[in-house]
Image (cartoon, helix red, strand yellow):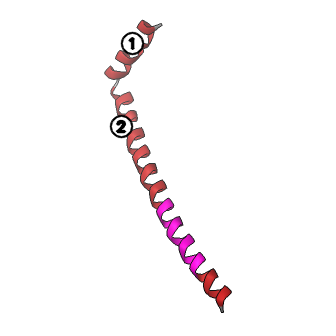
Amino acid sequence: MLAHWMAVLVRLKQDRRAVTALEYALIAGLIALVIVSAVTSVGTKVGGVFLKAASSVASA
């Protein structure tokens, strides 16, 4: 079984299209990671703004 997977990996390494697809997949993964972290950061800040607005309305 291990020999089969090693043969598959050797074939993929020799196939330039597979290497290019892997590079694009890594780039897409990094972009997704940046987007998720940015959305999380913005979401936290927006949540803080709404909490501040809600407390201002409640105290008025």
Taken as a whole, is the magenta stretch helix, strand or loop? helix
Q: Nearer the viewer, residue 25 or 37?
A: 37
The residue at the far bottom in this view is 60
Q: Is residue 16 rendered to the left or right of residue 51?
A: left
Q: Which residues are magenta?
A: 39-52
Residue lying at the far front in this picture: please name it. Answer: 59
Q: Which residue sits at x=44%, y=50%?
A: 33
Q: Assess whether residue 50 is covered by the magenta stretch.
A: yes
> Crowding near pointer 2: few (<14 within 10 Å), some, many (20+)?
few
Q: Nearer the viewer, residue 43 or 22?
A: 43
* Residue 58 percent location from the top left of the image: 67, 86
- Quarter assignment of residue 6: top left
Secondary structure beneath dot 2 equals helix
Where does label 1 land, which residue?
A: 6
Which amino acid type corresponds to the residue marked 2 in the rendered image?
Answer: Glu
Q: Nearer the viewer, mark 1 or mark 2?
A: 1
- Where residue 40 appears, x then y in whole percent? 50, 60
Say which mark, if any, is on residue 23: 2
Give the vertical position of 4 relative to 16 (above or below).
above
User: In the image, is residue 52 above or below residue 37?
Assistant: below
| CA distance for labels 1 and 2 | 20 Å
Residue 19 x/y as whole percent: 35, 30
Q: Residue at x 41, y 7 (%)?
A: 3
- The location of residue 39, given as percent across then percent down, is 50, 61
